[in-house]
Amino acid sequence: MEAIKDYQSKLATARKIKEKFSDVFHVIVERNFRKFRTATKFPAVVYEHRNFHELGEWYIVVTAESKSRFRAGIIGISAFQMLYDSNKNVIGVFLVEGDDDGHTFIEEFNRNFLDDYVDSHDMEVVNGTYVPVFIKFYKENFFSTRKDLGGFLVMADDEGREHRIVPFIMATPAGVALGFTNEQHEGHMYVQYKPAEEYFADDQAAIEEISDRVLNLWNDMEKNPWKYSPLKNLVES
């Protein structure tokens, strides 16, 4: 089962979007060079809107993961697109990422997830746009740890066929994103968000462990800028 509905067609779109990265990357970096150079908090993130016509409207996200990586010219780039229903209401976010080896990765975050995040952060959705909401989540979760929860669930697709899906979490000291993928990890779908203090209410040690992992990853990126590919969520369980 494709954890993300229409996975193959969305992956094909993602590959086309990824081909656009080189066309906009340098422009965005040059325009925001001073912001990156003087940043004191990382990841430092900027994003710009683009209309790729046949591929629709997207937001290109450029990220400096640490000061030493930026100075070495290592900068991450990704893109996301807001998903709408027939009434132009936001139903989710579609994220495209890649790595240095040319792989393309896609993730989706549904409306329930976005609303959970808004509620947990006491945010206000202005004029129905969730772009600032997703950017805040993206920055907060750039350094995070992903862990399969073990076992699998059985879900039926639109045609009634049953498939296995694998539940997992992506956690930071601030919060936990709950989602699922298939056994081949073909895309990740996020469906719920909870504050870390709530999710780990009976396990304070887990929050401390996650904090240590996230901090250690960032420190290692700062000390060894060429060690990691510019792809988020590299901490393994």
Image (cartoon, rainbow, N blue to C red):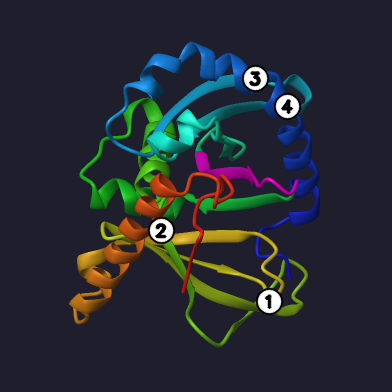
Residue holding disc 3: 24
Residue occupying the point 55% across, 51% down: 228
Inspect the image, locate mark 4, and give the three-letter code of the amino acid beneath it: Lys
Range covered by the magenta-colored residues: 90-102
Q: Earlier in the sequence, mark 3 or mark 1?
A: 3
Q: Earlier in the sequence, mark 4 or mark 2?
A: 4
Q: Residues within 10 Å of mark 3 (few under 14, many from 20)?
A: some
Marks 3 and 2, how far apart at CA: 27 Å
Q: Earlier in the sequence, mark 3 or mark 2?
A: 3
Residue holding disc 1: 183
**Which label number is shown at residue 20?**
4
Frontmost of labels 3 and 1 is: 3
Question: Looking at the figure, which quarter contains the N terminus?
Answer: bottom right
Inspect the image, locate mark 3, and give the three-letter code of the amino acid beneath it: Val
Q: Marks 3 and 4: in contact by CB < 8 Å?
A: yes
Marks 1 and 2, how far apart at CA: 21 Å
Q: For the residue labelled by badge 2, is the local secondary structure a helix, a strand or a loop? A: loop
Residue occupying the point 52% across, 32% down: 72
